[in-house]
Structure formats: structure tokens, C-alpha cells
């Protein structure tokens, strides 16, 4: 019954009939050499399926699809794939949507996921979640934004565009365990004419999903996006940042403004052991694409 309620990834190569992606199947690897980590694809919702294809189809958009070099599915051996529990292998590849909300002063909203969530707990990400059958991508993004932050945006109050797709796996490295979840995340950019102060006045965040939130400016986010997981040097980037950044923490139904070290946002994914509070790898990818949209206006 669960698969009926979930929108799953389907793949079509060279105009072949769309097939449901297998959990242990590399989405990027389906279309190109296993060594590649990004390519342009065509995508769109098609009869309660999220279709990814190497050719155009009715209603499709062409966007960048990317994954991290250390993507567990990329490095999964046949023996490891065979050892996955049957309920995991049968899940397919889920679809998620994440909303980069930019205020009038070009600050972007990030939320810290609750420590009690089953995947990617305590990470900083944009608001987002699953797509319900029958929903359009934007509708799903707006619903998730409303459910997590209480912020309701009406038609005509914003403009938007699709930024890119991200192949996401949890845990994020094979050294930290076999994959339990496999998603394609659709990053949407929403541009609001309101300031972040005006938007925040309407906040009523859901503590079950969000433990904190913050609005960060382009200079800070450029440093965050530059800390490449597995290869970046956060210490050099941190020199350009203030020592602390202001956030709003949620606890027992109340919201309190506090500060945390800027270095927290520059943490990278640990190869082993417990995860640390950090900005997710996919979020850094999306932030860099967002920064690229600002470039013509900052020259």
C-alpha cells in the first residue's frame, strides 16, 4: 500500500518505455558512464510518476542532475546490493522537493531538521519533503513550506523556477552503513518581494520537523557552498565569516533567538561514525546554483 501513496522515480532512455527505478540503481549511471556525477536530463511529473529521461517529452523541463562523488549507490557492490533487506530493495527511488526561499534582500531561509527524524537528523536544509500523488511540483513545495514553517505564500506573491535535481542517499557514505533511503530531490527557487523580517512575522514552525531556522545572506552562503564535502578546506573559508551567526531555536513551543559558531555551517560530512550538525551536501549544491543566478546582478 505504501508504494501507491508515494510518487516514485521512473526512467526512460532513448525513448524507451518508462520503468520504475530500482532502489539500488544509480539514476545518473542509468544515462551515462559510472564515473560521471552530473548530466543534463529532462524531467517532469507524468501520471503520478516523476519521469527522468534523456529526451524531451510533453511538459518536461531540462535541468542538471547531480550526485556527490561519494554517493553510496555509485559505489555499491553487487554483494552489498544483494544484502539489502527486501523491504529496502522494494522501495524504489522516492521523490522529494526542497524550497530555496529568497527574500527581497536576497537572504535565504535554512531550517535545521529535528534530531528525532529518521534520516538526515540535525542537518541544515531548505524546507521540503515528499510529493503527494496528484500534486504539482510547486504545490508540493508550497505545502511543505507551510507545514514546516507556517508560512503560506499565495499565487502572485512570488516568482519561481526549478534549479536542479540531486540524487540523495542516506546514510550519505557507504562507510557509515548500507543505504536505507534513496531520493531524487527537486530544488525549487522561490523569490519573494517581502523582506525576511516580514516573512518571519508569519512563521509558526513545526517542532516535530524543525528545531531551528535562520536567514543567511549571500556572502555567508557563498562560504557555505564552497566547503565541498570530502575535499573542501573549511578553515580558509571561515576567515571571511563573522565568528557567530544568529539563528532562531524552537523548544517547547517557544522560539528564542541565539547564536551558534559560523564554523557549524562549514562542517563537512564525516566519513565514519555519527554525523555532525552541518549543511547537507545537496543544499550546498543548490546554494551554488542559486549564487550563480545572482552573478549578473553583482558585477
Image (cartoon, rainbow, N blue to C red):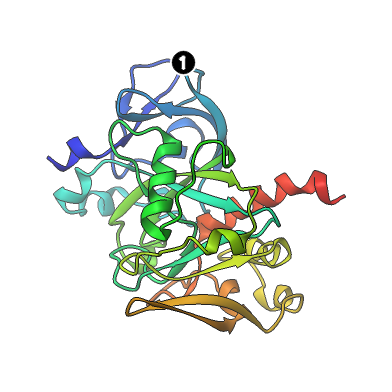
Q: Pointer 1: residues within 10 angstroms few (<14), some, or many (20+)?
A: few
- Residue 246, image x and y in percent? 60, 78
User: Vertically, is 83 above or below 38?
Assistant: below
Q: Can residue 148 be seen?
A: yes
Image-based side of 90 in relation to 171, left or right: left
Q: In which quarter of the image is the N terminus?
A: top left
| x and y percentages locating residue 40 in the rendered image | 57, 32
Q: Which residue is drawn at 55% across and 69% down?
A: 214
On the picture, is 103 further left or further right than 204? right
Q: Which residue lies furthest to the right in this view?
A: 299
Apparent side of residue 53 relative to residue 251 in the rendered image (left or right): right
In terms of depth relative to the viewer, which is nearer, 289 or 84?
289
**Percent coordinates x, y for residue 241 in the rendering:** 72, 76
- Identify which residue is drawn at 50% across, 75% down: 248
Nearest the eye: 188 or 30: 188
Residue at 53% x, 57% y is: 283
For the residue labelled by badge 1, is the local secondary structure a helix, a strand or a loop? Answer: loop
Q: In this image, 200 relative to 7: left or right?
A: right
In the image, residue 51 above or below residue 119: above
Front residue of 33/64: it is: 64
Q: Mark 1 points at which residue?
A: 58
Q: Where is residue 96 in the image (x, y as percent from the top left)?
A: 39, 45
Image quarter for residue 268?
bottom right
Which residue is more in the foreground, 186 or 214? 214
Amino acid at each position: 500500500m505504501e508504494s501507491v501513496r508515494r510518487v516514485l522515480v521512473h526512467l526512460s532512455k532513448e525513448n524507451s518505455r518508462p520503468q520504475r527505478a530500482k532502489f539500488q540503481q544509480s539514476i545518473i549511471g542509468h544515462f551515462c558512464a559510472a564515473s560521471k556525477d552530473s548530466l543534463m536530463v529532462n524531467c517532469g511529473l507524468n501520471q503520478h510518476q516523476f519521469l527522468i529521461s534523456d529526451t524531451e517529452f510533453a511538459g518536461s523541463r531540462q535541468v542538471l542532475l547531480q550526485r556527490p562523488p561519494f554517493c553510496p549507490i555509485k559505489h555499491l557492490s553487487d554483494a552489498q546490493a544483494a544484502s539489502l533487506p527486501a523491504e529496502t530493495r522494494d522501495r524504489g527511488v522516492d521523490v522529494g522537493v526542497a524550497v530555496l526561499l529568497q527574500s527581497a534582500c536576497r537572504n535565504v531561509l535554512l531550517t535545521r531538521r529535528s534530531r528525532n527524524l529518521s534520516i538526515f537528523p540535525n542537518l541544515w536544509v531548505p524546507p521540503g519533503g515528499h510529493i503527494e500523488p496528484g500534486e504539482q511540483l510547486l504545490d508540493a513545495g508550497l505545502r511543505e513550506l507551510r507545514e514546516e514553517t507556517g508560512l503560506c505564500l499565495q499565487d502572485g506573491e512570488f516568482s519561481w523556477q526549478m534549479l536542479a535535481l540531486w540524487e540523495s542517499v542516506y546514510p550519505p557514505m557507504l562507510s557509515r552503513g548500507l543505504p536505507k533511503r534513496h531520493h531524487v530531490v527537486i530544488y525549487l527557487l522561490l523569490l519573494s518581494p517581502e523582506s525576511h523580517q516580514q516573512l518571519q512575522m508569519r512563521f509558526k514552525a513545526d517542532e516535530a520537523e524543525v528545531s531551528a531556522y535562520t536567514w543567511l545572506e549571500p556572502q555567508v552562503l557563498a562560504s557555505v557552498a564552497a566547503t565541498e564535502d570530502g575535499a573542501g578546506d573549511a578553515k580558509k573559508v571561515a576567515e571571511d565569516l563573522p565568528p557567530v551567526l544568529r539563528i532562531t531555536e524552537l523548544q517547547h513551543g517557544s522560539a528564542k533567538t541565539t547564536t551558534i559558531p559560523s564554523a557549524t555551517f562549514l562542517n563537512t560530512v564525516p566519513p565514519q561514525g555519527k554525523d555532525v550538525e552541518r549543511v547537507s551536501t545537496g543544499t550546498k549544491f543548490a546554494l551554488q546554483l542559486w549564487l550563480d543566478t545572482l552573478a549578473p546582478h553583482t558585477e
